[in-house]
DNA sequence: TTGATAAGTAACCTTTCGTTCACTATAATA
DNA sequence: TATTATAGTGAACGAAAGGTTACTTATCAA
């Protein structure tokens, strides 16, 4: 219970931040959930703010890599059934992955206080899915699987209902 | 500056809650923004929690009245142009009305901590618009202005892109 | 004008927060 | 084994939080 304590603190912090927000989270409770005492935290982090910034930096880096580079794009489906299947799979993952769910909640809470959280929320909620499906629909239009149209508008109309449901329930 | 102090406190609280959240708001700062001192607040409210609950009660009552009864429904438009115009008007109002904007932010922040806020957020963000446009599309289908279909699905597909844009930017 | 009620203030209380520090136990290294 | 860096603890600190109290000032009806 020594080497991975830092990781455990970050995990517990993400969970607590995503439920109570930054201001609503206190270090006593956070460390107690790991069977530690509050002063132990300062062996791993210099301040509460560092615990906030560390996972946020990671999340920003993750989303830049995930949605900023084309190599992480899923393959263009070769049928409408394939599109639906891929969408279902992605939605399922988005709902079930605990870290993603917590990230979504965290950004909802903190987007109006922390500018970097706001930027990330915009990418996470709005642009990420839209950009991804824009590329997918472009590919499908080239293949003749979809009638040629503005792929961004189509992607937006296609993904926002899904996002709304996910955002509201998970 | 005596009689309406209570109202002013509530307004300032809504504004502060919508930016910093409940835990991030402190009474000293809140009352100072009105030129008062924190102890003055306790002449009007018994606790910080009461300042939280009072506007929340009002908001819940408002949304119950607004979306719970049919007499507040806008008239069914008699053309597609009328539909677009009405949608634009509603969106514009939703973006410009300060109280609505603050309510939206407040619910984003507090929905995972306060169960009543979560219920209200669901109504506010998701169900409210969908139910309203469901009725509108029902009426337009009866008039023959829209092809008969499931009006709820159509309303959902129609409103969620708008909601996504509003939610992200305002 | 007077008397009572409401509104506002300053000082203080208690609790909790984030943080520091001296110290102990543990683990790794030489 | 001896040494040293790392991880964890308990006590304490100052600041800030929510809340109370005794007191003053304003308001307004009788």
Image: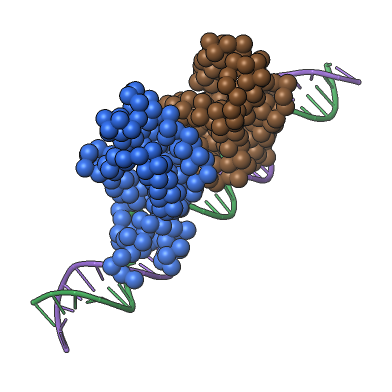
Chain colours: A blue, B brown, C green, D purple
Residue B151 relative to residue A21: left or right = right
Residue A69 relative to residue C1: left or right = left
Say if A19 sits above or below D5 in the image. Answer: above
Q: Nearer the viewer, residue B118 or B85?
A: B85
Q: Nearer the viewer, residue B32 or A133?
A: A133
* Residue drawn at the location 36% of the way across and 47% of the way down: A52
Residue B70: x %, y % from top left: 72, 24
The N terminus of chain A is located in which quarter?
A: bottom left
Query: Does residue A129 appear in the picture of this structure?
Result: yes
Say if A115 sits above or below A47 in the image. Answer: above
Task: Choose top left, top right, bottom left or bottom right for residue B62.
Answer: top right
* Residue drawn at the location 45% of the way across and 63% of the way down: A32
Residue B168: x %, y % from top left: 43, 30
Q: Nearer the viewer, residue A113 or A70?
A: A70
Q: How many numbered discs, if any?
A: 0
Query: Does residue A128 appear in the picture of this structure?
Result: no
Residue C24 relative to residue B46: left or right = left
Q: Nearer the viewer, residue B74 or B153?
A: B153
Residue A33: x %, y % from top left: 46, 63
Residue A62: x %, y % from top left: 28, 45
Task: Choose top left, top right, bottom left or bottom right for residue B129.
Answer: top right
* Residue drawn at the location 56% of the way across and 27% of the way down: B155
């Amino acid at each position: 219970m020594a080497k991975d304590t830092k990781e455990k603190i970050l995990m517990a912090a993400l969970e607590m931040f995503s439920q109570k927000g930054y201001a609503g989270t206190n270090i006593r409770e956070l460390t107690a959930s790991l069977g530690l005492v509050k002063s132990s935290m300062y062996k791993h982090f210099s301040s509460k703010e560092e615990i906030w910034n560390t996972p946020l930096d990671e999340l920003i880096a993750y989303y830049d890599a995930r949605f900023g580079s084309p190599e992480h794009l899923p393959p263009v489906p070769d049928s409408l059934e394939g599109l639906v299947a891929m969408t279902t799979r992605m939605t399922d993952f988005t709902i079930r992955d605990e870290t993603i769910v917590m990230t979504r909640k965290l950004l909802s809470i903190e987007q109006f206080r922390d500018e970097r959280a706001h930027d990330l929320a915009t990418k996470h909620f709005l642009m990420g899915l839209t950009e991804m499906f824009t590329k997918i629909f472009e590919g499908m239009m080239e293949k003749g699987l979809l009638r040629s149209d503005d792929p961004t508008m189509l992607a937006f109309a296609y993904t926002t209902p899904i996002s709304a449901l996910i955002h509201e329930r998970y």
